[in-house]
Image (tube, helix red, strand yellow):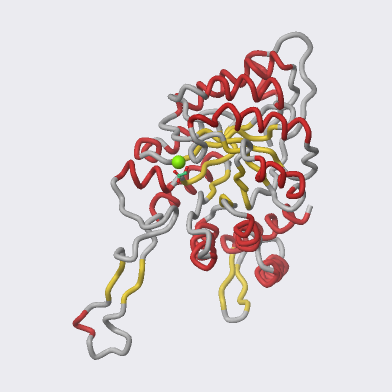
Amino acid sequence: MRSAKDFFAPLAVGAPAPLREIPARPSRAIHFFDPGNPKMAAKVPDMVGKVDVLLGNLEDAVKAENKETAREGLVTIGQETDFGPTQLWTRINALDSPWVLDDLTTLVRAIGDKLDVIMVPKVQGAEDIHYVDRILAQLEAKAGLDRPILVHAILETARGVANVEEICGASPRMQGLSLGPADLAADRRMKTTRVGGGHPGYLVREDPTDGDIEGARSTHQQDLWHYTISRMVDACAMHGIYPYYGPFGDIADVVACEDQFRNAFLLGCVGAWSLHPKQIAVANKVFSPSVEDVKHARRVIDAMGDGTGAVMLDGKMEDDASVKQCKVMVALAEELAA
Ligand code: GLV
Ligand code: MG
């Protein structure tokens, strides 16, 4: 577990800040809201305690002329709201935009004590994380904060994907990574028909020579995001941080949203973005292990005794390796129940 000294040591001034452990906290749904939109902002207090993360979005989807209003709105919400068990995150503007320096200086000074995580878009390599890390260290020291603000990167450029391992390991502030499918699709010249979804033309057709087999010549749509999510999951696991699916933009299609989130969960992701309140329930369901899965995992752990050797349970072999998977499942259930 990382502690505050990992973050403050290089720039500590005066008396050392009290050390505070940074626990892993559930973040199944990262719910996006526009802090400059009075209707959305008014709903924030009611959502506290009902969602793991509330994220005030300052980047894409906020018009250029509304950037200042959104930033000021987030300051007001941050100062006036008691977030209780819900984390407060923000997505700042891109590092090459004219707004990002003001985002960082204003937010850390005004609500740095409330902000848990800063999401950085369009991260290309470790240098982007170093830049944010150094600025945060200065602003935190100036504001007298005793708790480091963590950093979350969005993987949404081909270069970012190529540098994913170094991004994950660029700072002890790194909390996790999200897939940014819309920007990534554009950067790679991919073709999709909805944000975070696939394309009905990307499919596998059964071999026509199997024409005499029932069901042959049927088609199966493929998941365009499998490769990137797998790379992201490996890089995050290697550095002990969390991978997340990003947005699913077809709000009305909750079935496809659930399918997409579930694929990500099964590949190792711990959460996803929510762009509408109805996606919160989808993410909470998908990223929480089911009662049956936890029951089964506990049975395997009990049957394995000291965790070595092999046992047969329901006709299946379980051993040192499979019991580890069960322990991951139980640990997640306990973390969510805490
Ligand atoms: C998210 O930011 C995306 O580009 O999909
Ligand atoms: Mg994007």
Q: Is residue 26 left or right of residue 160?
A: right
- Residue 214, visible in the rendered structure: yes
Name which residue lies at 57% across and 45% down.
242
Please state the horizontal and vertical placement of residue 251, each as a whole percent of the image: 53, 59
How far across and down, in percent of the image, does residue 257 sit? 51, 62
Q: Out of 114 and 222, give the one closest to the viewer.
A: 114
Task: Give the vertical position of 324 relative to 45 (above or below).
Answer: below
As displayed, is residue 75 above or below residue 134? below
95 left or right of 193? Answer: right
x and y percentages locating residue 201 in the rendered image: 29, 65
At x 57% / y 20%, what residue is drawn? 102
Closer to the camera, 241 or 154? 154
Image quarter where the N terminus lies is top right
Q: In front here: 79 or 202?
A: 79
> Residue reaching furthest left?
209
On screen, residue 140 versus residue 193, left or right, reads: right
Residue 162 in which image quadrant: top left
Which residue sits furthest top?
A: 14
Q: Is residue 324 visible?
A: no
Q: Residue at x 38, y 59 (%)?
A: 198
Q: Position of residue 26 (x, y in %)?
A: 69, 49
User: How many marks are shown on the rendered structure?
Assistant: 0
